Image: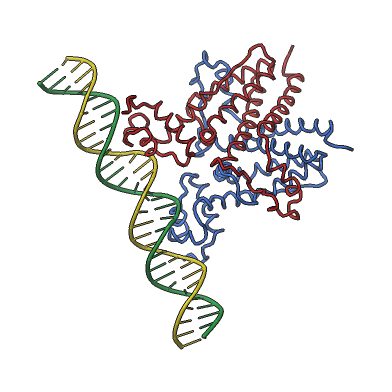
Chain colours: A red, B blue, C green, D yellow
Amino acid sequence: MTSEPLSRARIVATAIDLIEREGAEGVSMRRIAAELGVGVMSLYNHVPNKSALLDGVAEAVLSQIEFTDDPDAHWTERVRMQAHAFRAITHHYPRSTMLVFGRQLHSNAGLLPVERALATLRGAGFDGQQAVRMLRMFIAYIVGSLLREVGVTPTFAPVHGSMVKAGEVDPALFPEVSELAPLLTACDHEAEFAFGLELLIEAIAVHAKNGGTRG
Amino acid sequence: MTSEPLSRARIVATAIDLIEREGAEGVSMRRIAAELGVGVMSLYNHVPNKSALLDGVAEAVLSQIEFTDDPDAHWTERVRMQAHAFRAITHHYPRSTMLVFGRQLHSNAGLLPVERALATLRGAGFDGQQAVRMLRMFIAYIVGSLLREVGVTPTFAPVHGSMVKAGEVDPALFPEVSELAPLLTACDHEAEFAFGLELLIEAIAVHAKNGGTRG
DNA sequence: GGCTGGCACGTACGGCGTACGTACGTCAAT
DNA sequence: ATTGACGTACGTACGCCGTACGTGCCAGCC
């Protein structure tokens, strides 16, 4: 039946599929094996343990980021594109992404985005120290944003009411939250992401002019 | 022996203690019960299930943020202080914090920081929509930063080499990463956090002048 | 043909969350 | 004082989990 032979790649792919379909908590070696029509222990011929398998998931997700970098574009535009490319992959694999954020990488899979970003920033005139700082800041913002976007739907719950459900907050204790409840519950993720990104780019563009570039 | 009676608060406190000592993965109902010198099922008289217990942990951690707000200070200074207060708690409970970031709140425990921040921002002259956007951006940056800071030491490993261990990166494939490896591996978290925070504050201060405030 | 090495598989162990039944203390109504 | 209801602590048991270990099969090489 299962013509294709078992392999690490097939196992990882199945794991990703399972995670996206049923959530990170639902993934288990037994479930994956069943999905592949295979005995549980057969997996261990290709993967040392579950943790390594999840590392593989992270690696696979990260390596699928599609950069369409335009070397001729202004560096601000290139930063924008890289940020959105990163965001796109997390929307393609939302639940796997959460997993990626929760564990640190032990492979070089995450290095390509870093390389690209550093090259872009140094091309903008920042020195090494500055570029690294800027990169860290961008990553922090992007990861934080995506954590909110994706975390808001841990079970893909249609109602994302979170805690500030209308009328459930005491206006005496939390006047601002209470008043702004409609704005807090509604969120155009795309717009919010872009807003912060632009602010960040503006902010560092000032620094680029003030001494980052030398020409 | 255990004079004090079992209670939700005691269970949550023990869970936090356990998480900080042995990591989030090491926490289990059985371990908590053993820690308390109590049968496993006794816990269920005070907590409906493990997930709710972890919600309690998140709530407890969040509610321990110490705000020392100064109403007379400039709003930029107040934002700074709130951000650092948030950061402080995550350093006090690093492993529990990771847990907080990984699950969304179902209680009002996280509302006080939000209320404070919104009040500060609106005091700066931003309207509701703007304040909410700014807040979201700050939270994204702060959470992203702290995720990096804390995630770097999941086992409190003394070596935090991560992936860019010196000489382990191919300079031909990743020239920037390779060249900047020393800067990438070393990280003064405090300084990096402050750097990005200042940049963000500067950025929104410009917007405040441009139309946020009306006086 | 026989040997060797890799792969699929079954069994088994210890640990997990928790449903369920039980025993015991306290307190209210009788 | 007796009884009954109730809350709490506890033990047992079930169905999951990750995975150590041993067994059998089959391909490729001598």
Residue, x 67% and y 33% (percent of image)?
B191
Residue D20 screen position, x and y as percent: 31, 39
Q: Is residue A64 left or right of residue A142?
A: left
- Residue A191, by quadrant, is top right
User: In this picture, is B13 found above or below A118?
Assistant: below
**Image quarter of the C terminus of chain B:** top right
Would residue A141 be found to the left or right of residue B131 on screen?
left
Q: Residue at x 85, y 37 (%)?
A: B213
Looking at the image, which residue is at 73% across and 30% down?
B199
Question: Residue B99 or A70: which is nearer the viewer?
Answer: A70
Give the total of numbered labels. Answer: 0
In this rendered view, identify the residue nearer to me: A108 or A171. Answer: A171
Tell me what residue is drawn at x 45 percent, y 41 percent.
A26
Residue B159 position, x and y percent, is 50, 33
Name above or below for residue A139 compared with residue C1: below
User: Which quadrant of the view contains residue A90?
Assistant: top right
